[in-house]
Amino acid sequence: MEDLRLGVIGLGLRTSLALAAHRPGRGSVVAALCDSDPAVLKSRAGQFEAGYVTEDYRDLLDRPDIDAIVVNTPDDTHERIAIDCLRAGKAVYLEKPMAITVEGCDAILRTARETGTRLYVGHNMRHMGVVRLMRDIIRKGVIGEPKTVWVRHFVSYGGDYYFKDWHADRTRTTGLLLQKAAHDLDVIHWLAGGYTTRVNALGDLMLYGDLPRRAPGTPRPANWLQEYDWPPTARTDLHHVVDVEDVSVMNMRLDNGVIAAYQQCHFSPDYVRNYTVIGTEGRLENFGDGPGDTVKVWNTGPSGYRADCDIAYQVPAAEGSHGGADARIMAEFCRFVREGGATDTSPVAARMSVAAGHMATLSLRNAGLPYDVPPLDPDLAAYFADGQIPE
């Protein structure tokens, strides 16, 4: 089997995905690289030994030696780049979030259908061991039928990762209930077995709005990934535009009646997600997703809180970035490009997570007013449910 030849657009923090896909002689090889920053392009090129490098992604579109393209660029570029790639007949891996508006997502979906070109959206949490474990516990009926899902997301590095670059600018992300929460909203939908239809939310820029910012055009400090300031109020060198919320909470009603809640804070001292799913016959909960972590289940009672729980499931050990999820998701993408067929990720699911986050952002900026999530065109939904088979 010849290696699938991939082009990668964007060589920032998600280069781990490209590295996971670069398996010369084992099925896939990164054959071309693109980044608008020539210094980044030069520094990354040696990691792949790619035969072609360019600062303009359009140079990749007509190359017959590129089978598929991995898009890891900033969120506000996803719609334009993905549509151009699809129209050029290149299968696309699109890093989450799919786009920064519902309309942008739908434009990408329509283009994929019109061109018959394969589209894959990378919600890699579906390939994390802890998420798959929770899904399996629910599917086995251990807690009965899910009725409510709660997620708390503590983001200790938020001031560094999301307020020192373009993430802090709502014109480039919409907001962190879309950009950062898209993964968790997708997991909520996956575990609950439904999509959000109605949301309301509250949020504010409570801490990072008053901290020192860099002048426009000033680069982020070179050591920002190595040195983190504490307490959060000591942070400096924030992006010159900071207008996204650093605290947000949202409530959701899903199309199957499930009620869900998501909370996010970007100045917590620790980084962890906490999932709770309560069903008709029990509750599961987890903290963390690393080796030694567990998913706990309580399915007898009633009683007071019992720290020892009724069943403790060990989160499977894994190696590699994002708990091994990056390697698994790139393997699924390459298989999908070659063979088609069902995948654990879904462009429709990716659209629905963006839609929930987009409407929640509108809600929190309008005093918590409830918003309905725009439904997807049934014909588009059917096309992707049937495996993206051209008519």
Image (spheres, grey):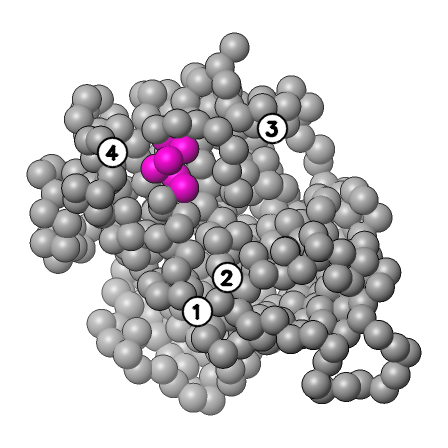
Characterize the local packing of mark 1: few (<14), some (14-19) or many (20 or more) Cα atoms within 10 angstroms.
some
Q: Earlier in the sequence, mark 1 or mark 3?
A: 1
The residue under label 2 is: 129
Q: Position of residue 96 (x, y in %)?
A: 47, 48
Which of the labelled discs sits on residue 7, or is there none? none
Is disc 3 in contact with disc 2, using a CB cutoff of under 8 Å? Answer: no
Residue 248, located in which quarter of the rendered image? bottom right
Whether residue 320 is situated above or below residue 373 in the rendered picture: below
In front here: 304 or 180? Answer: 304
Whether residue 383 is situated above or below residue 282 in the rendered picture: above
The residue under label 1 is: 317
367 sits to left or right of 16: right
| Amino acid type of the residue tagged 1 in the rendering | Ala
Does 371 appear in magenta? Answer: no
Q: Secondary structure at mark 1?
A: loop
* Residue at 61%, 71% in the rendered image: 313
Q: Secondary structure at mark 2?
A: helix
| Amino acid type of the residue tagged 3 in the rendering | Ala
